[in-house]
Amino acid sequence: MVKKLLSLISGGIDSSVSSYMMANQAYHIDYIFFSTSEKKNDFKIVSQCIKAINKITGQKNTKLLLINYRHVLEEIDKRCPKNLQCVLCKRMMYRIAEKIGRKKYVALLTGESLGQVASQTFENLVVEDDAVGMIIIRPLIGFDKAEIIKVARKIGTLKYSDKHRPCDFVPKKPRTKSNINEIAEAEKKLEIKRLIRDAIKSKEVIKF
């Protein structure tokens, strides 16, 4: 039986490359996209990246789970410290992906590489992993940006990912070294179960 991974794809360069790498290792990849904008452009970019990955790897029957995520970020932005928003956001994404995928997938898959942005420092990755029990596979963890871009160009996703725009909610000075105690304190201000439930209710399934 082919093992299945659920990839957290953003439309950016990294998550498409990590998905290609694991698909190329004979894993079946399905995708989950956390939409934070009312505009359709981000979804279009994600769709183009998935099609390019499928074309080069030969994957078929691929599913994209589309989640309306903006309300989660708005709650985090309103109730929690600004400098912890990126870590809190990742923890919520992982929880939602785990809730949806635990029975169907052997692991979650991300495009994170060590230290590339604030949420990807060693300290913050440890705190983010603490939110879930599923394995999180990070095939790009030791890659630098130039190496990732080289692969993206090779597989045909770079031309789409270059159009991807950054998140509207990234704070000016995100914490690069959070700890579980302060994150737990911040999360007391969130109705986590309700936010997860509402996000899952918004799920749409698109097949490729």
Image: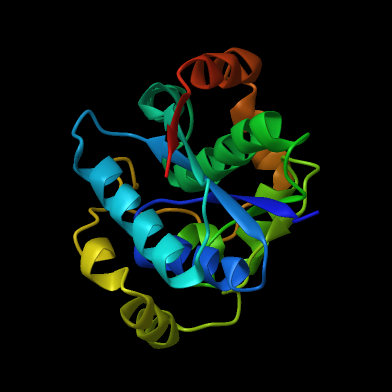
Position of 50 with respect to 104 (left or right) is left
Could you say which quadrant of the image residue 21 lies in?
A: bottom right
Question: Which quadrant is the C terminus positioned in?
Answer: top left
Q: Nearer the viewer, residue 120 or 63?
A: 63
Please give left or right for residue 51 compared with residue 113 in the image.
left
Task: Using the image, determine if residue 31 lies above or below residue 199.
Answer: below
The residue located at (56%, 74%) in the rendering is 140
Q: How is the image coloured?
A: rainbow
Q: Is residue 48 above or below residue 192?
A: below
Q: Measuring from the top left, give residue 46's x and y in whole percent.
A: 34, 50
Residue shown at 62%/28% (left/top)? 187
Q: Residue 94 at what x, y percent from top left?
A: 62, 41
Percent coordinates x, y for residue 4 in the rendering: 69, 51
Q: Quadrant of the N terminus?
A: bottom right
Question: Which residue is located at x 30 percent, y 46 percent?
Answer: 167
Left or right: residue 128 compared with residue 204: right
Task: Please tell me which residue is depicted at 58% across the width and 34% down the height of the picture.
Answer: 92
How many circles with numbers are drawn on the protein?
Answer: 0
For residue 117, say whether it is visible. Answer: no
Residue 136 in sight here: yes
Give the camera-side residue of 92 and 149. Answer: 149
Q: Say which of 126 and 108 sits in front.
A: 108
Relative side of 70 to 61, left or right: left
Q: Position of residue 89 (x, y in %)?
A: 50, 39
